[in-house]
Amino acid sequence: MGQPSTASRLLQGAFVLALAAIMSKVIGAFQKIPLQNLGGDGVFGIYNTVYPFYMMLITIAAAGLPAAVSKFVAEENALGRPEEGRRVARLSSALLGGIGLVMAALMYAGAPLLAKIIGNSHVAASIRTASLALLFVPLMTGLRGYFQGLQQMVPTAVSQVLEQTVRVTVMIVLLLWLLRKEASLETIAAGAMLGSAAGGIAGLLVMLYFWYRHRHRLKAADQSGPTGTWSRTGRWKEDRVQGQMETTGAAGKRSNAEWVRMLMAYAIPVCLGSLAVPLMNLVDTFTVPRLLQREGLDEIGVMVDFGIYNRGLPLVQMVTMLATSLSVLFIPAMAEARLKGGPEAVRQQAGMALRWFWLIGLAASAGLAVLAEPINRMLYGDAAGTEALRYMALTAAGSTVSIIAAALLQGLGAVRAPAFSMLAAAGVKALLNVLLVPALGISGAALAGAAAYMLAAGLNVALLARRSGMRPAIGAALAKPALVIAAMGAAAAVAAWAAEAVLGGVGIAADRRLAATGISLLGMAAGIAVFVLAAARTGLLTAAELASVPKVGARLAAILRRLRILR
């Protein structure tokens, strides 16, 4: 049996990472639900005030270098210089460890100042506990970059899931213990943030285990004689052109200083691009609490309102995480299409990706908006902030399209352009917060987010159309999706109304949590079924495109064809 093709390995690797990312995000979403349910909206608000700032520092410390490690390790292995790839990993680990240590010290020492800037003294303890994760997470991400450069995605996937699992477990255990001790809100929130450090330790230990096992295999291979590399499945493949490897290895030797310069030159633009997304959330951290405080709320009241505002965030993030995970497919695919297929292949690839993710984002936005109240009751026990949750649901469409358009642009070589789009959107978000929050409260902040992400999507799509020569038909991009989403939303609303009527008829009030769960799940099931049917009947979803989905796509396409639903 022959070796799998590069495209096949890419697809398999992306599927593994996407699955791990989805599992991690699901775990993370469920983490926030018990955090709010047990700790209340005040603890939830403190946690969600600090977490974006923590993510910003993690991005600065760890976003660019792992991507650079992945790139250079892949190149060195392709040229027959695996030892150079390992040297890159060691150098990057030293860099990441140093950066993480400095960031942790600054964050810990600067916690009181940051709390003063945010305008709430209750967040200082959580900032300090969050800083401890910076000692471990950057090192972990650097090792992930090394294995990704070898096209070994399993170590990354395992560490992602275990990191999130340990993080949530420690958070819940500390949450329960501190609640029993009747600790203050700020102490409980700080204990919840400590889970990030525990997760970072667990993820790092997993990556060190894979590194140790990798080094052990290499030593065993050296003792056996022939040289080669380990495949993604762990099988040894002997090199066929030993002389060529030795020649290129001698010619390609670089000093440590040269490697550091190359790593930083590649990492800094990637890091700047990655900063745009956490910056959007950080805008809320530094504006919304202060704006709410001007409306007469005390510090605890501000945190309670901010916690209610963030109830919809885990739901939207699950959609955007799916888009982020799957977007890794399109960066190399667009680069390959540009080199091999020419302009027409680029236009087809870009058009299909945008159409799929526009539909996914619209469906998520419409479904969450229609079912906002029962979902709110199902997850959080009451209907507080339902209007804000409904408006926040609208961010799913813009953020999803923005993410996939950014990935397509990066595949075409426009690495920095998406970052400028997100920076512009962050500026608009800050301005709209100032204008809307005083008038509408947390609903104004949610509306500001929806508008800002739609702006980022529009800028990225406009640039993509210019770079690829794509000419999207506005009618086709809006009319058919509008019909599909309208049908889906109507089905979800009718199913939810029918479920509520039936429950009311047997004496079960819709505001009870169990009833809200039944209404939400039935509404979601009806909406998803109608969405798939309508997308297939209108031609927005074709058999060939559905069959390309890993694992289940071909089987689902065959079923829908037999039912004469899919063309």
Image (cartoon, rainbow, N blue to C red):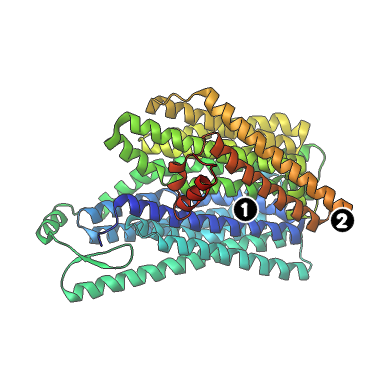
Q: Amino acid at mark 2?
A: Ile
The N terminus is located in which quarter? bottom left
Q: Which residue is mark 1?
A: 111
Q: Which residue is mark 2?
A: 508
Q: Earlier in the sequence, mark 2 or mark 1?
A: 1
Q: Quadrant of residue 2?
A: bottom left
Numbered tag placed on residue 221 in the rendering: none
Question: Is residue 280 in view?
Answer: no
Q: Amino acid at mark 1?
A: Ala
Q: Quadrant of residue 224?
A: bottom left
* Residue lying furthest left: 243
Viewer-nearest residue: 462 or 289: 462
Q: Say whether residue 213 is left or right of residue 543.
A: left
Q: Within 10 angstroms of label 2, few (less than 14), some, or many (20 or more) residues?
A: some
Q: How many marks?
A: 2
Is 370 placed above or below 223 here? above
**Residue at the location (39% across, 38% down)?**
410
